[in-house]
Image (spheres, rainbow, N blue to C red):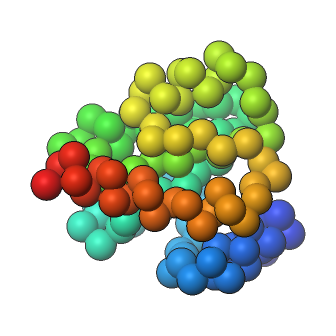
Amino acid sequence: MIPRAVRKFFSLLLKCSYQVTTIKSARQVIDALNAEGSDIDIILTEVDLSMTKGMKLLKYIMRNNELRRIPVIMMSAQDEVSIVVKCLRLGAADYLVKPLRTNELLNLWTHMWRRRREHG
């Protein structure tokens, strides 16, 4: 079962006209990236409480030359500067603090556009 907060977020993204796929585990994200990486425009991922899974996923993506073209947006209810800086240093395109607002989601496409321009 998908948690209520995720359903709400999913619904908000759909209202903003994004095509959305939800994946429950970091392992499944990696499998999806390996299978469909060229078709994925952006990754929104949670910085989990222990920070290990979210950071490991970000590191995996940034080490892969094919996948690093995909902007990774980290999000969390934690707004500690040290966590934000760590995510950005590891290669995240942005860090969003929850609860997310519609205007933040509407502007996600700018990350895709910017990354595509940088990587040709």
Identify the residue at image location x=76%, y=59%. 101
Q: Quadrant of residue 36?
A: bottom left
Q: Nearer the viewer, residue 17 or 45?
A: 17
**Can see residue 85?**
yes
Q: Quadrant of the N terminus?
A: bottom right
- Residue found at the far left of this picture: 120
- Residue found at the far right of this picture: 4
Residue 14 x/y as whole percent: 64, 81
Q: Quadrant of the C terminus?
A: bottom left
Q: Nearer the viewer, residue 58 or 13?
A: 13
Residue 75 x/y as whole percent: 65, 45
Identify the residue at image location x=46%, y=38%. 92
Residue 53 x/y as whole percent: 57, 38
Q: Quadrant of residue 4?
A: bottom right
Q: Nearer the viewer, residue 26 or 115?
A: 115
In the rendered image of this protein, does residue 102 appear above or below residue 20? above
**Can see residue 31?**
no
In the rendered image of this protein, does residue 18 appear above or below residue 115? below
In the shown orientation, is residue 14 left or right of residue 77? Answer: left
Identify the residue at image location x=46%, y=64%. 109
In the rendered image of this protein, does residue 50 appear above or below residue 34? above
Q: Nearer the viewer, residue 24 or 47?
A: 47
